[in-house]
Image (cartoon, rainbow, N blue to C red):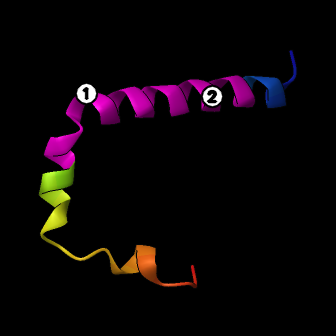
């Protein structure tokens, strides 16, 4: 197994975990961050 394959597998698992976590916590996180404006997301430059 190449290191790149390990990295891909780990990042795939990480994405799945993140999605699971977001679904589990869901509205709570959204409520917590909704009172502060997300300016960095709406700006075109990164």
Q: Which of 12/42 is in front? A: 42
Residue 16 lies left or right of residue 5; in this view the side is: left
Mark 2 near mark 1, Cβ–Cβ under 8 Å?
A: no
Numbered range of the magenta stretch: 7-29
Q: Is residue 25 magenta?
A: yes
Q: Is residue 3 above or below residue 1?
A: below
Please give the name of the residue rendered at 25% of the width and 27% of the height, measured from the top-left corner. Answer: 24
Pinpoint residue 11: horizontal percent, then vertical percent. 62, 32
Which element carries disc 2, helix, strand or loop? helix
Please give the name of the residue rendered at 86% of the width and 14% of the height, measured from the top-left corner. Answer: 1
Q: Which residue is mark 1?
A: 24
Please give the name of the residue rendered at 18% of the width and 64% of the height, measured from the top-left corner. Answer: 34
Q: Is residue 19 magenta?
A: yes
Please give the name of the residue rendered at 13% of the width and 55% of the height, measured from the top-left corner. Answer: 32
Q: The C terminus is located in which quarter? A: bottom right
Q: Earlier in the sequence, mark 2 or mark 1?
A: 2
- Neighbour tally class for label 1: few under 14, some 14-19, many 20 plus, Cα within 10 Å: few
**Residue 12 marker:** 2
Label tally: 2
Pinpoint residue 26: horizontal percent, then vertical percent. 24, 38
Pinpoint residue 31: horizontal percent, then vertical percent. 13, 54
Q: Which of 17/44 is in front? A: 44
């Amino acid at each position: 197994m190449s290191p790149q394959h390990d990295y891909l597998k780990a990042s795939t698992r990480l994405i799945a975990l993140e999605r699971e976590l977001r679904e589990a916590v869901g509205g709570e996180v959204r409520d917590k961050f909704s009172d502060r404006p997300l300016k960095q997301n709406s700006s075109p430059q990164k």
